[in-house]
Image (cartoon, helix red, strand yellow):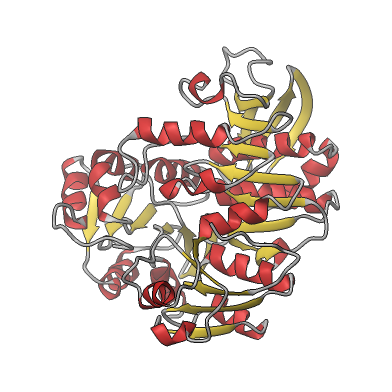
Amino acid sequence: MFKIDLNNPIHIHFIGIGGISMSGLAELLLSRKFTVSGSDRSPSAITERLESDGIKVYYGQKAENVADRPDLAVYTAAVHPDNPEYAACVELNIPLMDRAELLGQLSRAYPVSIGVAGTHGKTTTTSMIALILLEAEKDPTISVGGMLDAIGGNLRIGRSGNFLYEACEYTNSFLKFFPSDEVILNIDADHLDFFKDLDDVRHSFRLYAERLPEGGCLIINGQIPNIAEITEDLPCDVVCYGLLSESDADDRYEFGARNISYDEYGCPSYDLYYRGRAMGRIALSVIGDHNVSNSLAAIAEGIRRGISLETIKRALLRFHGTERRFEKKGELNGVTIIDDYAHHPTEIAATLKAAGAYPHNTLWCVFQPHTYSRTKALRPEFVEALTLADKVVLADIYAAREPNTNEISSEMLCEDLRNAGKDAYYFPSFEEIEKFLLKNCVNGDLLITMGAGDIVKVGNSLLKR
């Protein structure tokens, strides 16, 4: 395996440089005096930023893009051996490394290496911890899977020994990282095009936890079923957090939340309990009980880093979310338009439940399923989650990396929802969806475009009218 020496800059080429994580890694290496180039399918705001930083970006992936023989080429999980640049690197004996391996090698260079994992909530929780570290002037390096206003994008390059990043489970990427601290937010059945089932997912999270050294710390959601499978016999410290029910003792979790209430926009506040002792009220500027849980993980990491609770409180109140996480896009004729990245039934349910506390008359969900495998495997769960909206509009499935096997479709989901008594509609084009919404949404309605694909275009297009 090729080893990177941060003190010996080389030329690294990124195949798919326009992705959130890839672009951040490219900028991080550029800051270390590496020569960086890359390619992507088409221009974007991210690639334009990279070009303005001095990175050579090629559009279209072609063999000639690596003709100058970079010392190393880095690729994403979406790039396969038949990719022209990948194939050219093999032919030219240019070493190849996947994105996760690169992030893992970089994580070894920092004494404090914080990897935030979980099936849901990684970007939000990483962002919460980022604001806490910044408020405490810890000068961290941050790599986040979304655009965070506080750092002006998805990457911040610090000068301290603190490195904060998302640790994704897909294709077992996080098993290539070397964290000193880990956060595990939740473990759900997802990425079933890679994992066999939920037990397989849980096994990978156990292996991730085992990567922690003695003296490290695992911060984990205590409400994960059969948590001992993940935590028993680890050499590190284990800190649990969770939402406290009425019957729970105050000290059930090291960090607990009780007496949750909501302001007029659905943003929660709660009583924080630390080791069974009430520590005062925590107020958030993002919606939903799922973000109460996320904030507990962030608080636990902040306390772990020796940051005062008052500093943590200030940082959490300043956090208003990241791009595509219940992001208010604007209003059209009195209709509030929100965009959200939720693409798993658990995420959809959490977002729609949270939206119930947001001011509205009728709650519309315009959902674009993401990948055929996920939609097929979790079809009943998608239907159950979507029934939490008053009215559902379905777009075609966003294929991402998968071929269409014709075993599942948005039309099938629509029929399932109608059979469940829900007002549901399917349209094969965004243009038809927009026309329907313009005709049927009225003053006071809340419209959420939802999914991990390009459904955000619907809201953006409506607001341009």
Residue 9, percent across and down?
Answer: 70, 72
Q: Residue furthest left?
A: 406
Quarter of the image where one finds residue 328 = bottom right
Residue 116 in view (yes/no): yes
Q: Is residue 442 left or right of residue 240?
A: left
The foreground one among 378 and 199 is: 199
Residue 261, percent across and down?
Answer: 62, 34
Residue at the spot 28% in from the left edge and 42% down from the top edge: 378
The quarter of the rendered structure image containing the C terminus is bottom left
Residue at the spot 67% in from the left edge and 69% down from the top edge: 29
Residue at the spot 58% in from the left edge and 59% down from the top edge: 102
Residue 300, percent across and down?
Answer: 71, 34
Residue at the spot 78% in from the left edge and 29% down from the top edge: 280
Q: Is residue 66 left or right of residue 316?
A: left
Residue 453, percent across and down?
Answer: 38, 63
Task: Count the labels in the image.
Answer: 0
Q: Is residue 411 left or right of residue 176?
A: left
Q: Is residue 99 left or right of residue 29?
A: left
Residue 264 in view (yes/no): no
